Every structure is written in C-alpha cells, then in structure tokens.
Amino acid sequence: MFFQKLFTPYKINQCEIKNRFVVPAMVTNLCDEDGNITEAFIKYHEAKARGGFGLIITEDYGVNPHGVGYKNCIRLYDDSQVPANRRLTDTVHMYGAKMFAQVFHPGRQTSSAVNGGVRPVASAKIPDAFNREIPHELTVPEIHELVGEFANTARLMKKSGFDGIELHLAHGYLLAGFLSTRQNRRTDEYGGCFENRIRIVEEIYHAMRAEVGDDFPLTARVSLTEDTVDGRQMQETMMIVKYLEKLGFNGLNLSNGEYTSYAPELISSTFTAKGYNVENAKRVHDFVNIPTIVANGINDPAMAETVLEQDACDFVGMARASLADPDMPRKAARGQLGNINYCIRCLQGCEGSLLEGNHVRCLVNPELGHETEYTFDEVTSPKSVLVIGGGPAGMEAAIAATRRGHSVTLWEQASELGGEFISAIYPPAKGEYANYLVFLKHQMTALNINVVLNQSANVDNVRAFGADKIIVATGGDPNKPNLKGIDAENIHFANDVLLGKEPIEGEIVVVGGGEVGTETAMYLADAERGHITILEMTDDIDAGLLRTVPTKRFFRDHEVTVVTHAKVKEFRDNEVIVDHRGVEEVISADQIVLAMGYHADNELLTALQAELSNVVAVGDVVEPTNALEASTSGFKAGYYA
C-alpha cells in the first residue's frame, strides 16, 4: 500500500484509532442557539465518519450556558443533554471511527452579544482586539467554580459515549490566556511564574481525571507559538508540553496562533505555507513520549503520509480538507487521488459564512452543512436538462442533476470549461484554486455529462433542444464605466491581463482596490512589469477575508502604491484624472487596468424567460457575487432540476 503509515492503527491511551486521519475541531454553527445538538450537526459528522476518518474531534463545548464564543456554540453541562450527544457518538461509531469532544471556555474572545448578555471573563482585564469588551477578571472562588464545571462536563462527555476529551489550551481562549504572559497579569496564585500560570490547567486536569478514570483519553490542544509582540514562543511551549505529559495528558494536538497573531497561521490560507506547523511539531514530538497530532494547511494524503514518515507526529489533522471532501480517506485507500475534492484554502465558506452568523459552508463542496437536505434519492421521473454556461455554477448544476438521475447537456460558448474562475487561479497565492476546476472537470467526465464547447445559445436553438429544464449560468461581464477616454488602446480589463491576453508593462494604474483589482496588481508586481498604482474610491482596499493583511504586506515588499479616496473622472493619453479627497490630480499611466466590478450577463436569460417557463438562473447571471454563491446556487438548481 502506498500509504503505509496513514492506514496503520494507533492508540491514544487505551483507545485504538483505525488510521491517522483526524478531523480537528472546527466551528460549524449547526447547533441551535441554546447549544443543543441538531440533526444537521449529526449528519455533518456522520459524513466524515462514513468517509473513513479515524478520529473526529468535535468543535468546542461550553461548560456552562454563558461560556460560549459564538452563536450556536455547543454546550454540555446538564444530564438532559446526554441523549442527543449519545445519538451523535453512536452514529459516528457505526463506521468504526472514534470521537473526542473538545471542551473549552472562550475567555475574553467572545462578547456579551453571543454570550447571553454576560460580560466576557479572563485571567486579567485586558480586552481582545476583535471583541473589544473589557473582560471581568476571574476571582479565585470563580476559578474554583469553573474547575468544577469542567469536571462536570467531562463526566457528561464520558456518559455520552465520547471516546476521549480534548482540553482547549490554544488560540488565545481562557486557559491559553492563563498560560501566557500576553494575557495573564495576575499577582495571586494563578499569575506570575510558570507554576502559577499553569495551576488552573492542573486543577482542571485532576478534576476531569477523577470523573473519567485513568484509561479514558485526556488530550490537550496547544498553540506552538502565539506570533504576537509578547506572545509565547517555542522554548516556553516546550516547558508546557513536557509539564502536560508529566501531569498525565495522553496526547497533544499541536496548532498555532491566536486571534491577534501577526500572520494568518491560526487559520491556514493560501498565503500560509502548507504544513506550516510541521517543523515545530516535530520538535515537540521528539521531546515527549505521548502521541501528537499536527494540523495547518495539510490537505493532501500524500503530504500527510510524508509528515508521518518524517516522524513529525503520530496523527495528521486535516480540518478544512475534511470539509471539502469528507470521503478523502476512503478515496486515498483506493488510490483515487485524482478523485479527491481538494480544499483550496479560500476560507470563503468555512470562515466567511461563520463571520456572517451563518452555518459552515464550502466553496468546493456545496453539500457541506446541507447533509440533511441533499440525500441524493434518485428521482422518479428523470428529465432532460440543458445547462447554459460552463463556469463553476454551470458545472455544479450539471453534476448535481446528473447524480440525481437526469440526462444533462451543458453548452459553453468558450473553447474550455471554467468561465471567469479560470482567471482566478493566476494571481500569486491562488495556484491551489486550479484544483477546483480540475475536480469539476473530472466529475463531468466521470459522470459522462454531454459537454458541447464553442456553443452559443439563443432562444431558437434552446427551444429547439427541447429540454424539460433549462439552467442558465452565463455569469457576468466586467463593468466599463461611461467615462471620457474609456476606449483608449491602453485600457484593459483585469481578466484579460490575468489570462495573458494583453501583456502590459511600464507605469501601470489599476482602477479598483477590491479582490480582482488587488490580485491583478499582485500578478503584475510579481512579474515585475513595472511600477503599479492602485486607485480605490473607498478608504481602504479589500482583498477578501484574511487576505487583505498579507496583500498589504506584499504591496509593501513590491513597492505597489495604493491611493484611496480616489475617484476616476476621465482618461487621457497616458494619464488618469482623479478626484483625490476633493482635489483633482493627474496620475501617469502607460497602461490602465479596469477592475471596477461586474454586472450580470442576463440578456439571454431575459429573452428565455420571456418565451419559456422552465428556466432557472444561477450564479452571477442573477447578481454578481462570488464563487461561493455561484457554486451553491448552481448545485441547488441542479439538485432540484
């Protein structure tokens, strides 16, 4: 077998886990607002267990009604909550997987808005940079009460059928705050020296161990570093992990960072090196004699195997990879690596949706979070379905409809599939996005979907085709403002530049500081095409979720000029005239790139809807948004064709 280590069983305490694939804890927002388990939450985890993951670690359980960090945070503090949790563990166990429950307290990294109106608590009165509320400093009696609550939750977790418990000591939450001098400024027995700062963890460990017994796995999640001006670095981490081992913890889950870390290493994006934590994790693995898990940007079974072969850990956490494809272990076992739906680390659904208060989603896996809805029962009356447009929305529609049993044909007017998403794979730090198009094309071929390229659509040929259902996914077109000089030869659309259709160099002005504009500027700067200036109307550029900060860093390194509060008035020969904070300015420009948003390409849609009653619109043809919404709407239309 190619993956010798990945599929070798391994124990944590007395719990044998069938392989080394681990789903680390991730927020889903799939529970109800009281923190109770829902059917959607169970089905979400069932998909991963069915897909072959050996160990699944739940998202963070709160130990009391107000110890939560976000809307719909799961909680376990009362015996009445046990039956639902037992249904969860029984479901996961049906597939031979093991399930650990993560237990935490958010500390200062929450707000009264999601915490039942209760003020956040912490080791000291230092506010979190994101939530900003000044926390209540826990008193010693309150700490003792909290220790009892952790013990009670541990008792209920074992009663609920969990195979182990992971105590959250990472990412800047309450217990991490006690451990770190970044947060802990106490002068009593819980502050100051290392022995005092780790005291609360020691007390919680002994209280939980008394409830679950010696043979029950108790593990800890630890940030290797905090990546802040006064945060913990590796030497202090080595003190902590050795202490945890001597205390009796049975394993370590090694992560990184906290909410205010300098770089986005807490949540791996395409700006973060794959396997970012592996080197430091190996230091820990070589130092302790208990099993370790490492995570962060490992989304490929081949990389996971090599990490194990380096003896850097005993298990590999593949969090967002499991969102993109919960069947990854099963496919890897069969050698079907080309059939894996790889995570592209875009963060649009797994993080962006949560920040908007919604449940977890995934750009490349529209089924995620909808496992109770998309059951793929075969339709009783198959239809003839025509999909017009071969971008992500169109391909997702075609794939979903075919899987339901319909006969599908897809028309694409270009010579290849991919639509506007093709240009999205060319900017720096977005090469992984190509995996999504590769997967979609693979599915189209595997399902024998009839694809007709170089095929334009109009009312006559669509009517003549005679489909029972027509799904229009013709996307959008870039905006072209009605400004003087707009048709000059040195003015180009961003997508054409990214695709290499119009190579440019010299003094370059990019109009628009949104995602497309910033990525085009990066592309040009990375290729050293000349000096780049970005003009943005608002007060700042917006490169997208968790991408803006590293994009600004890239611009500093490549001497890209960003001019905000700049509204373009007209274009002249090798010049752009702008209103900059109420003052007219002239900016030199050998070449000009337009990245001023999109509008729906809905001329065909309007004509079809006027003539036919069986037309559905998906993606940007409805309203330009993003690839997450396009894939979601396309998949849904295909499923319900």
Image: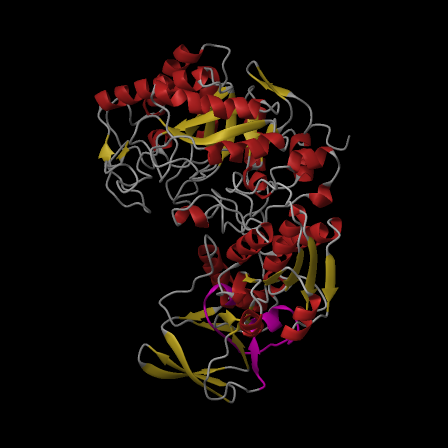
Q: Position of residue 625 (x, y in %)?
A: 48, 62
Write down the quadrant of residue 490 in the picture: bottom right
Q: Tell me if residue 239 can be seen.
A: no
Q: Is residue 608 shown left or right of residue 402?
A: left
Question: Does residue 422 lie above or below 163 as drawn?
Answer: below
Farthest front residue in view: 381
Q: Tell me if residue 492 can be seen.
A: yes
**Residue at 44%, 24% in the rendered image:** 85
Q: Position of residue 624 (x, y in %)?
A: 49, 65
Q: Is residue 318 shown left or right of residue 82?
A: right
Quadrant assignment for the N terminus: top right
- Give the magenta part as a residue range: 489-516
Q: Magenta includes 496? A: yes
Q: Is residue 67 shown left or right of residue 574?
A: left
Question: Does residue 18 lie above or below 213 as drawn?
Answer: below
Q: Position of residue 231 (x, y in %)?
A: 39, 39
